[in-house]
Image: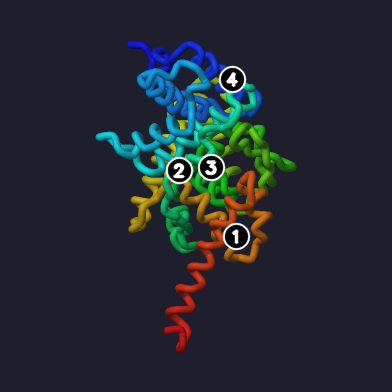
C-alpha cells in the first residue's frame, strides 16, 4: 500500500522532500522530528489533493483554515495538542515555500492553533526522589546499573534519551572519577553538566562491578548503560527502570520519563539557582522554556504560605 505522500501532487511532493532535507540537514533536526514532519505534511498534501490543489500557489489562507477546522471536526478528531503540532508542521512548510519563492505570502501565518491548557511539569519532592533512588539499592547487576542511571538522571537533568545515548567516553574526570558528563541534546547540541558526588559513586560502582559483566554478554559497544544481554539500554527499558523503581518505592503518583528532569530543575530553583544557569544545564534553547519551572516553585511557595501564615486565609 503506498504511503499517503505518494497520492499527493508531484509538484507539492517534490517541495515536501526538499523541505524535509532542509530541516534534516541545514537545520539539524533529529530523525524522529523529520519523521513527524513527514507524517503531518503527507496527510496535509493528501487533503490538498482531494480538494484539487496541485501547485504550491493553491495553498491559500482559506485552504489552510479549512484544513485546521477539519482536524478538529472530523469523526476521529485530534486532540488540541495534536492539532497544534500538525499546524506547526504546516506553518513550517508554508514558510519554507515563501523563502523558496514558491509563494508570495505565507497563507498559514494567520491560522491560529488551538489554545492548549497550561501544563506545569510534575516534580517529585526531595523525599520522593530519595525513596525512588533507595528503591534501586542492591548488589544485583541490574540494581547497580539502575542506581547509576537514576542517580545520573537526577544529578544532571538529562533526558532519558540523552542518558541512554551516552558512551563511556562521555564521562569526563581525573583518575577514574567522573566530574562532568557530556550530553548531546536535541539537534546534536552538546553541553557539559557537572555530576554530583552521589551520582559519581553510583557510576563508579556500576563501571567496576556491573558493566564489565554485562558487556561480556554481548558484542563490544561503547555504550555506557547496557541491558542484561550486553546491548545498549533502550529508552523504553530505561523508562521501565524508572517505573519499576517507583512501584517498589510505593510512590502514589504518576511518574513520567521526564520526572527526574523536572525534579532536577525544580529543586535547583528552590535552592536558589539562577534560571539562566538552569537553562544551560537543561539544554533549553530559550530561557522562556525554563521559566515554567519558576511558576512551579512560585505555586509551591503560595501553597506553603496559604497553609502556614495565620492571616493568609
| Label 3 SS | loop
Q: Earlier in the sequence, mark 2 or mark 3?
A: 2
- Circle 3/circle 4 CB separation < 8 Å: no
Nearer the observer, disc 4 or disc 1?
4
In this view, the mark in front (3 or 4): 4
Check the image and report above or below for 70 versus 151: above
The image quadrant where one finds the C terminus is bottom left
Report which residue position mark 3 lands on. 159
- Give how far apart the Cα atoms at labels 1 and 3 are: 16 Å
* Residue highlighted by disc 2: 113
| Secondary structure under the numbered disc 1 in the rendered image | helix
Reading the image, the residue beneath label 4 is: 21
Residue 77 at x, y percent in the picture: 30, 37
Foreground pick, 144 / 245: 245
Q: Residues within 10 Å of mark 2 (few under 14, many from 20)?
A: some
Q: Earlier in the sequence, mark 1 or mark 2?
A: 2
N-terminal of the two: label 3 or label 4? Answer: 4
The Cα atoms of the two marked residues, 2 and 3, are separated by 27 Å
In the rendered image of this protein, does residue 77 appear above or below residue 46? below
Circle 1 is placed at which residue position? 268
Amino acid at each position: 500500500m503506498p504511503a499517503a505522500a505518494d497520492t499527493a501532487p508531484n509538484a507539492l511532493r517534490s517541495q515536501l522532500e526538499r523541505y524535509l532535507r532542509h530541516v534534516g540537514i541545514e537545520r539539524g533536526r533529529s530523525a524522529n522530528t523529520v519523521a513527524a514532519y513527514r507524517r503531518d505534511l503527507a496527510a496535509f498534501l493528501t487533503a490538498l489533493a482531494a480538494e484539487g490543489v496541485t501547485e504550491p500557489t493553491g495553498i491559500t489562507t482559506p485552504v489552510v483554515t479549512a484544513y485546521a477546522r477539519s482536524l478538529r471536526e472530523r469523526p476521529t478528531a485530534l486532540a488540541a495538542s495534536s492539532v497544534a503540532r500538525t499546524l506547526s508542521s504546516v506553518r513550517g512548510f508554508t514558510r519554507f515555500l515563501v523563502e523558496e519563492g514558491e509563494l508570495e505570502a505565507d497563507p498559514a501565518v494567520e491560522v491560529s492553533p488551538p489554545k492548549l491548557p497550561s501544563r506545569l511539569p510534575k516534580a517529585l519532592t526531595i523525599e520522593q526522589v530519595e525513596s525512588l533512588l533507595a528503591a534501586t539499592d542492591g548488589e544485583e547487576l541490574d540494581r547497580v546499573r539502575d542506581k547509576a542511571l537514576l542517580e545520573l538522571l537526577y544529578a544532571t537533568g538529562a533526558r532519558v534519551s540523552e542518558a541512554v545515548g551516552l558512551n563511556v567516553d562521555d564521562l569526563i574526570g581525573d583518575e577514574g572519577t567522573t566530574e562532568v558528563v557530556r550530553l548531546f541534546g536535541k539537534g546534536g547540541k552538546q553541553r557539559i553538566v557537572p555530576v554530583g558526588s552521589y551520582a559519581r559513586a553510583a557510576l563508579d560502582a556500576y563501571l567496576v562491578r556491573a558493566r564489565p559483566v554485562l558487556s561480556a554478554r554481548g558484542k563490544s559497544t561503547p555504550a555506557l548503560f547496557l541491558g542484561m544481554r550486553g546491548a545498549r539500554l533502550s529508552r523504553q527499558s530505561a523508562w521501565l527502570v524508572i517505573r519499576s523503581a517507583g512501584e517498589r518505592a510505593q510512590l502514589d503518583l504518576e511518574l513520567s520519563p521526564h520526572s527526574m528532569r523536572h525534579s532536577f530543575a525544580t529543586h535547583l530553583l528552590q535552592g536558589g539557582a539562577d534560571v539562566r544557569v538552569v537553562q544551560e544545564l537543561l539544554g533549553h534553547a530559550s530561557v522562556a522554556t525554563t521559566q515554567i519551572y519558576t511558576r512551579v516553585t512560585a505555586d509551591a511557595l503560595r501553597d506553603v504560605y496559604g497553609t502556614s501564615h495565620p492571616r493568609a486565609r
